[in-house]
Image (cartoon, rainbow, N blue to C red):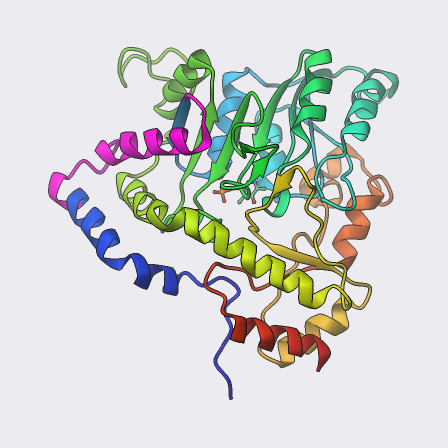
Amino acid sequence: MSDKIDFIDLKTQQQKIYPSLMNRIQRVLEHGQYIMGPEIKELEEKLAAYVGVKHAVTCSSGTDALLMPLMAYGVGPGDAIFTSPFTFIATAEVIQILGATPVFVDIDPRTFNMNPELLAQAIANLAKNPGTAHLKPKGVMPVDLFGQPADYDQINAIARQHGLFVLEDAAQSFGATYKGRKACSLADCAATSFFPAKPLGCYGDGGVVFTDSAELADTLRSIRVHGKGKDKYDNIRIGLNGRMDTLQAAIVLAKMEVFAQEVIDRQKVAERYSRLLQDIVKVPFVAPECTSVWAQYSVLSDRKAQLQQKLKDAGVPTAVYYPLPLHLQGAFAHLGCQPGDFPVSEESSRLIFSLPMHPYLSDTIQDRIISAFKG
Ligand SMILES: *Cc1c(COP(=O)(O)O)cnc(C)c1O
């Protein structure tokens, strides 16, 4: 009986950073500022510097990091927000929470990210379609799926033509690059998540919004604390209890010490997978202008069920992101979408599955995974 293989290994990382982690946690226990303690400011400064934007506003989750900018832009009923149907529910959920309407745009079959040509078409079709003619186009939310940025030069140009804001869902792509620029800096604003399984995670929930706009950052800081004005008891708008815990910020700070190396190691693991699996499955495509941070290593195969079973029999865990595109989810049934509306997303859902992926995956374990495909 061989050792169990982890889909994501957080233990090895913890052992590696243990002294620093404990030191950071202990400092929080000593100063006792559990809400908005000094670690929050320290983390926001480090994150903004890493990404290369002026403002980072931490918050309680990746979902709130998507919700807060939409609130700041005043998104509400009658607004259309263009996004991908091939993503985690949170991306479109935050649009719906505010009473606005998600308008889905199908993906590029190679990158799984929003297809810019189809975005232009969807904007043009909005007024022509009787079902959506009453909606006002307001914003675009591309997703950097599996850790690879979407095509922002094209998406931003289309958005600018129509006066739309662009919010980058970078929940999976913190640490990736597009044309030499860091993910989270590629649009008007960006949201990422510190959910434990993300490339940079904490030990609970957390998130952050990035923007170069001082005005937007101020509004986000107000929304984060119940719409505060001068202070918490001066309420100038409706907001949230949307703060990140000081303890979680301390944990992200400890993890940032090894993050740059982890990105390199993730890329090595992915490159080795692709080299050794290219004759067996369709391996991921990374656009020449991008680097991926490999939140997931996802392959396509028309023998998916059979391969997943073989891997399972050999003790190799796999997962499917995403088994059902959002336009076919019950939560969005009111939009009236049908199977066949977004064929690339639907076909990707049918063929895709993801392999164990983390920076501490050894060649030995990876060889076991690869031989399980052949077994
Ligand atoms: C994880 C994720 C989110 C939500 O982040 P949470 O921190 O879990 O709220 C949003 N969008 C995408 C694409 C994600 O992968």
Q: Is residue 240 visible?
A: no
Decide if residue 153 is on the left or right side of residue 5.
Answer: right
Give 147 or 286, whichever is nearer the viewer: 286
Residue 46 highlighted magenta (yes or no): yes
Q: Position of residue 114 (x, y in %)?
A: 72, 35
Name the residue at the left extreme: 30
What residue is shown at x 71% (from left), y 59% (from top)? 299
Q: Position of residue 106 (x, y in %)?
A: 78, 37
Give 75 or 348, whichever is nearer the viewer: 348
Instruction: Name above or below for residue 271 compared with residue 211.
Output: below
Instruction: Indicate the quadrant containing the C terminus: top left, top right, bottom left or bottom right.
Output: bottom right
Tell me the magenta residue range.
Answer: 29-54
Quarter-wise, where is residue 128 in the image?
top right
Instruction: Name above or below for residue 333 compared with residue 242.
Output: below
Give 88 or 112, whichever is nearer the viewer: 112
What residue is shown at x 47% (from left), y 59% (from top)? 359
Q: Is residue 233 visible?
A: yes
Q: Position of residue 109 (x, y in %)?
A: 79, 45
Quarter-wise, where is residue 224 in the image?
top left
What residue is shown at x 22% (from left), y 57% (from top)? 19
Decide if residue 148 is on the left or right side of residue 335.
Answer: left
What residue is shown at x 70% (from left), y 39% (from top)? 113
Q: Main secondary structure of the magenta part?
A: helix
Quarter-wise, where is residue 221 in the image?
top left
Count of labels in the image: 0
Residue 260 highlighted magenta (yes or no): no
Decide if residue 192 is on the left or right side of residue 88.
Answer: left
